[in-house]
Image: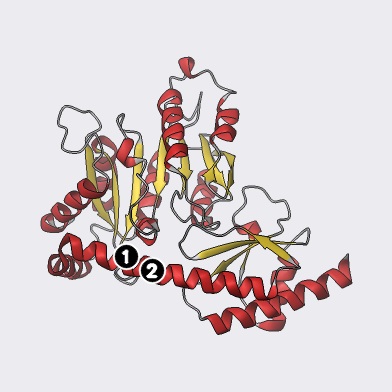
Amino acid sequence: MSYKDLLDWIYELQRQVHNPPTYNNDQHPGKMKCIVTNGAQHGLSLVMENLVSKDDICLMESPSYAGAKALLGPLKPKVIPIDTDKHGIIPSELRKVLSRWNPSTIQHPGKDGPKLLYCVPTCGNPTGASITLERKTEIYELAKEYKFLIIEDDPYFYLKSRPYVPSFLSMDTDGLVLRMDTVSKVVSAGIRIGVLTGPAPLIDIFRCNIETSVQQTSGLSQQFLLALLKKWGYEGFYENADKMAAFYESRKYECLEAARNHLKDVAEWDEPAGGMFLWIKLKVKDALPVVEKLIQEKSVFVAPGLHFTLDSKPSPYIRVAFSNTTYEKLNKAFESLAQVIKTYKSENE
């Protein structure tokens, strides 16, 4: 169960920020509804485990969040990657993939057409890319045409400074969007509270799943969050989110400066739109042995790109997280990375 006062606060927040066409629309079969979850990952788990069956056709941005990959793996769907660039999903690439189906003949999404499209649209993990409004509009029109759901996993939404880019939820006339939010990035990760928003018939299924498994999100966490939100009010919430966005933006620029100091000759990257991550392409064929040497010899931990790609091919990419470090540590880490890359190339290429 979710506390009614907390849910009421969340409903009003979703109205203020997203104001979807299905909000408070009793005549719409997909009227917007929310539930409180044990973090955004729990919401994503509810969606995937309840909606995806073996051999269902699922579209995923590539590279993609490793936690989503891990969720889908045991469910054994047919996953099709959609290429991205520094502005997120490329609509022309999505359209190219969709061209293999005739939208007029799709009767059972998942079997004779895609069931869903998964993405992290704001300050994505691992790339830091944000999908532009123009691209979102085009992608949503394709979702309507081909009858697939958009899984809008958006934990970093409030880490992008205002004005916010309108969400997929904000344009959801047809009840096709399931959106995950979290307070982990702007309040506290430890209280494990997220929000799952979408069409009422699906949200009711997920609510039943919660009630018959974990029963409810921690009552103590909900009461703590509610007390804090009431003290802040909506403007206080936005102001706190602005502070967090500014904090992470400063960390981003420190990370970029440290990268320029040491990696210009051995790697390349695009500036992330925001968030917590820098996606770096090393000038090697496979970053995994470099990452292994970096950990073993320098005690510097980064994630290899292989964790985020949707095939098993070698990847030249790494993901660097800059949320919980300092400029001095980033400089030292990137200096070590440059040394390891140069040594590896001299020994292997």
Label 2 element class: helix
- Which disc is residue 246 wearing? 2
Pointer 1: what residue?
A: 242
Label 1 environment density (alpha carbons within 10 Å; few <14, some 14–19, many ≥20)? some
In the displayed structure image, the side of residue 6 where residue 286 appears, left or right: right
Q: Camera-side residue: 221 or 117?
A: 117
Question: Residue 106, image x and y in percent?
Answer: 46, 20
**Residue drawn at (46%, 25%) of the image:** 146
Question: Residue 279, image x and y in percent?
Answer: 60, 60
Label 1 element class: helix
**Residue drawn at (28%, 58%) of the image:** 214
Q: Amino acid at mark 1?
A: Asp
When asked about the image quadrant of residue 306, the answer is: bottom right
**Residue 30, relative to residue 246: is it above or below?**
above
Dots 1, 2 in contact, CB < 8 A: yes
Q: Quadrant of the N terminus?
A: bottom left
Mark yes or no: residue 26 visible.
Answer: yes
In the displayed structure image, the side of residue 278 where residue 337 appears, left or right: right
Question: Residue 67, image x and y in percent?
Answer: 49, 56
Q: Quadrant of the C terminus?
A: bottom right
Mark yes or no: residue 295 visible.
Answer: no
Q: Amino acid at mark 2?
A: Ala
Color style of the picture: secondary structure
**Residue drawn at (33%, 72%) of the image:** 190
Q: Camera-side residue: 112 or 268?
A: 268
In the displayed structure image, the side of residue 139 where residue 86 appears, left or right: right
